[in-house]
Image (spheres, rainbow, N blue to C red):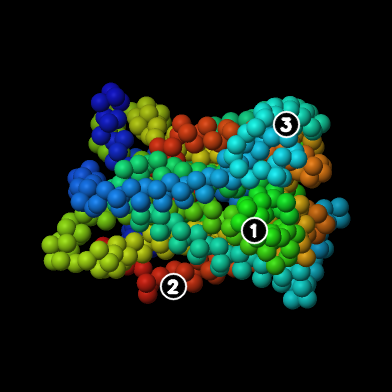
Amino acid sequence: MSALTEVSRLKKEPRGKKRKLTAAEKKEERVSYLFLAPWLVGLVLITIGPMAASLYLSFTDYNLLQPPEWTGLENYSRMFEDTRLQNSLGVTFLYVFVSVPLQLIAALALALILDRGMRGLSFYRSIYYLPSLLGGSVAIAVLWRQIFGTSGLINQLLALVGIEGMGWIADPSTALGTLMVLNVWTFGAPMVIFLAGLRQIPTMYYEAAAMDGASKVRQFTTITAPLLTPIIFFNLVLQIIGAFQSFTQAFVVSGGTGGPADSTMFFTLYLYQQGFGNFNMGYASAMAWLLLLIIAAFTFINFIASKWWVFYDD
Amino acid sequence: MTTNIAPQTSTAPAAGLKQTPAAPPTRRKNRNSEELGGSAGRRLLKHLVLIAFGIIMLYPLLWMLVSSLRPNDVIFREAGLWLTSFEVSNYTEGWNALQSPFGHYMINSMIVVIGSIIGNLVSCSMAAYAFARLKFRRRNLLFAIMLMTIMLPIHVIIVPQYIIFSELGWVNTFIPLVLPKLLATDAFFVFLMVQFIRGLPKELDEAARIDGCGHVRIFTRIILPLMMPALATTTIFTFIWTWNDFFSQLIYLTDPEMYTVPVALRSFVDSTATSSWGSMFAMSIVSLLPVFLVFLFGQKYLVKGIATTGIK
């Protein structure tokens, strides 16, 4: 849960007074930076440095062979005419806003069912969690290609009940749907987080409510649901950030093309094609910054909106 | 010294989530008796539904496993899980279908995985110790930056990073994949460890300080042995993520000799006609096996890990 609450907690901490450090404090400071050294080097050389370079490149035309040529805002204005880019944004948004809610609903439902201190909890939890671990792999994407293929598993099963199937992946109207199914299939990870959250709700709340004659439904709406909102919020933010960056499944399922007819062309896939297929490094950098802005904007909106629906018990 | 403290601390820093004093065991019991109150029929029904749902969830995986042992023409006819014949040839064919035997790619993957694990364990634990136990100026600022990098999409750094590494001649080596881990760029592990160290009793450090231990000794002799659960979680997640990672391996490894498992598998898919699903499935199963084994033996740490940081 925490990474999010940490950030808001930090702001509240009062600033330390400025004063001269004692010798012992100075020594501790030196030791601190010794411990931090690898992380700091990484922060500067692997994260912040390349970020700055990427921002600079986003204002240039650069193909790796010739030196970058400053073109100002051209990469960004080009986006307004690039219909494939706009399409890829549409595909990504659709994917995020359909599959993430479905995934979280499945996760929450299963967590609520499993929470009743039932026998075999850890067994069920393991079974439902396993797809989350495997779902991001190329192997599962390969499997998906077969399952939703014209003569794949789904169509075989449909044939058993007399329904004629279709080429789910070959048809632009359903190809994205198969990737959404894949994302929903990995609901196990948020489910485990929900289960951990449910455990944090003190039993005495339920005991008191039961004593007052509150029904199970009422216990859910007045105790479980409000106390779980921080976890729902956390899962929502996390899954949205993750889903915006989905790449592997679309890449493998579509054979790297984003097809059919660009229907599975995720934004990250288009970015990869521009940067590492056509070596339009400047344009790819501009796209990366657009992605960062979109993710930041949605995270920000989530945080603002959370004031109205997320309930903090402390 | 460590053995007598370990039991009490091992449960304490289940980390991120607030530690409520309400003891879980008693609650479990209550709920159990509650469940016993319900009718046996309803309970049975619930288990049946949960098992049925579990089978649906795992069906694609089981079907792939079974199909990997079937001749190609049967794969497209048989939706069930019954094996009539046992076709091992898919595995032998798949193993040798690419330029090098598949084991070569698995070794490549293992090298990257082991390098990443060592890198994460060393660099993240060091940074975590500083954030959790040491006082220094701008600590809050740096900590906030560290938290923000957790959510940073790799795309805003990958292009310049690629340019730098290719200038250094490191494309088609494992350095671009392992070096960032040695520099603690997997910040959520730093966060996970910070949370864990915060849960360890501070008196231990103080006692050691009085005995004349410096920070390096406190870190290596006291904190590190006590944070084994967090290190295990880090190891397991690094293993699974690195093993599954596709994007950066696809970008940095273009020479078939250097392919790791995901990149090799992808080139297999692209190079073969759809007629060899059997051997493709076989190699997919082989590629999933290590993750599955880690899942089997490391479940405890996996569950703890995602409950703490929400990682997949």
Of circles 3 and 1, the one toward us is 1
User: What residue lies at 29% left-to-right and 30% top-to-bottom?
Assistant: B6
Q: Which of the labelled discs sits on residue A162, or is there none?
A: 1
Q: Is residue B225 visible?
A: yes
The secondary structure type at the circle numbered 2 is helix
Decide which of A94, A214 is in the foreground and name it.
Answer: A214
- Chain letter for mark 1, please: A
The secondary structure type at the circle numbered 3 is helix
Q: Vertically, is B98 above or below A210? A: above
Quarter placement of the N terminus of chain A: bottom left
Between the residue at mark 2 and the residue at mark 1, the CA separation in whole angstroms equals: 50 Å
Which residue lies under the disc numbered 2?
A: A304
- Among numbered discs 2 and 1, the one appearing first in the sequence: 1
Q: Vertically, is A68 above or below A308? A: above
Percent position of residue B112, x then y? 64, 34
Find the residue positioned furthest to the left.
A211
Between the residue at mark 3 and the residue at mark 1, the CA separation in whole angstroms equals: 31 Å
Quarter placement of the C terminus of chain A: bottom left
Number of residue marks? 3
Between the residue at mark 2 and the residue at mark 3, the CA separation in whole angstroms equals: 54 Å
Q: Which of the labelled discs sits on residue A285, or is there none?
A: none
Q: Is residue B175 visible?
A: no
Whether discs 2 and 1 lie on one chain: the answer is yes
Q: Which of the labelled discs sits on residue B90, or is there none?
A: 3
